[in-house]
Amino acid sequence: MKGLASESVRYVVLSGQDGDVLPDALVRLLAEHDVRGGWLRATGLLVDVAIRGYAAELGGQGPVRRIQGPIEAVSLDGAIGVLEDEPTVTLKVVLARETELGLETVAGELVSARVVVLDGLVTVVDGVVVPRALDRRAAPDAPKPRVAKPDKPDKPDKPDKPDDPWSAAVAASVEADDAPVPVRRGQAGASGPVIPPRPVRRRAMDDMTLFPEPADIVEHFAFGRCEVVKSDGDRLHLKVDRDGRIKEIALEMLRVTELASEDGKAKHFRLDRKL
């Protein structure tokens, strides 16, 4: 762990304009105000959001997930540094919105988004250059970066510590290619880094094959036992046994598990909420 001291701190108040694209608009703002190190915090309303999170099974960032429609950025923040002599910021975000199943909250690294409303504050630490580098595990063939310290000549980097779990973690995902990522029916297409096939992807595709049809029986986590009366794309219309009401649900937010058939004719499924 290293510490860089600064005796000068200033602030930049940011106000996003409708249509601004993140993170590009923020990087331009940082360059205009000569921000080389600091911290950014903001809240607002975003659309066309793409996020991703750390995938333990992959040992790095997982595939990009796209969120349709507007969603509130409850918290948007990130450490500001310098990569190849240009300001850079890796944004972490907590998002929330109301859905038919209740309040939905997701979090991860913000890959891109379009601003509807955004207000925030940049705390600028002058006199300190915070270097950023590619994660050696994510890009083992990339050249090692040189670390520039203020008012001191550059020195060759020391060899990386073996298995350093936090090496340049805040900038682990600077680059990504256009390899397609499987998505569920009804979602916009997404792109993400090249990732070798893993069971986690195959499970996501298997979920799509489990689709209850009319006359099938489902055990819904909230409604209990129901009969499927209509299937419409990725949505189901269920007749609740206990009161006869018809409920419309979206399978995108549910985990579908096939159960043993009770009569050998109608299929039987369990619908659990995804965590």
Image (cartoon, rainbow, N blue to C red):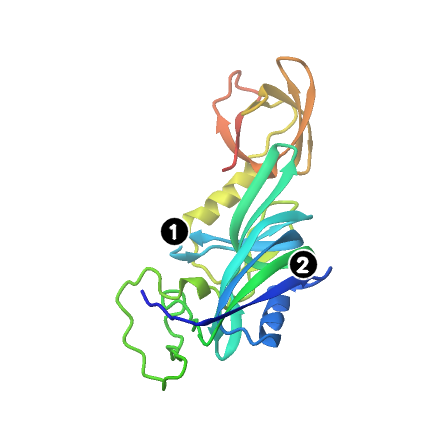
- Tell me what residue is drawn at x 60 percent, y 43 percent: 96
Q: Could you tell me residue 219's position as x and y percent?
A: 54, 22
Classify mark 2: residues with Cα within 10 Å, few (<14), some (14-19) or many (20+).
Answer: many
Q: Which of 162 and 2 is in front in this view?
A: 2
Disc 1 marks which amino acid? Ala
Query: Who's the residue at 31% across and 64% down the image?
Result: 1
Horizontally, is 20 left or right of 34 in the view?
right
Could you give the CA–CA distance between mark 2 and mark 1, rounded to whole angstroms?
29 Å
- SS of the residue at dot 2? strand
Decide which of 247, 161 is in the foreground and name it.
161
The residue sitting at 42% across, 47% down in the picture is 199
Q: Residues within 10 Å of mark 1 (few under 14, many from 20)?
A: few
| Residue 64 visible to an observer of this rendering | no
Does residue 74 lie above or below 254 as drawn? Answer: below
Q: Which of marks 2 and 1 is nearer the N terminus?
A: 1
Q: SS class of the residue under badge 1?
A: loop
When asked about the image quadrant of residue 154, the answer is bottom left
Q: In this view, does 209 lie above or below 154?
A: above
Front: mark 2 or 1: 2
Q: Which disc number belongs to residue 24?
A: none
- Left or right of 58, for residue 64: right
The residue where tag 2 is placed is 114
Q: What residue is disc 1 on?
A: 56
Kind of residue at badge 2: Arg
Indicate whether 218 appears above or below 8. Answer: above
Q: Which residue is drawn at the image coordinates 41% and 62% (left, top)?
A: 169
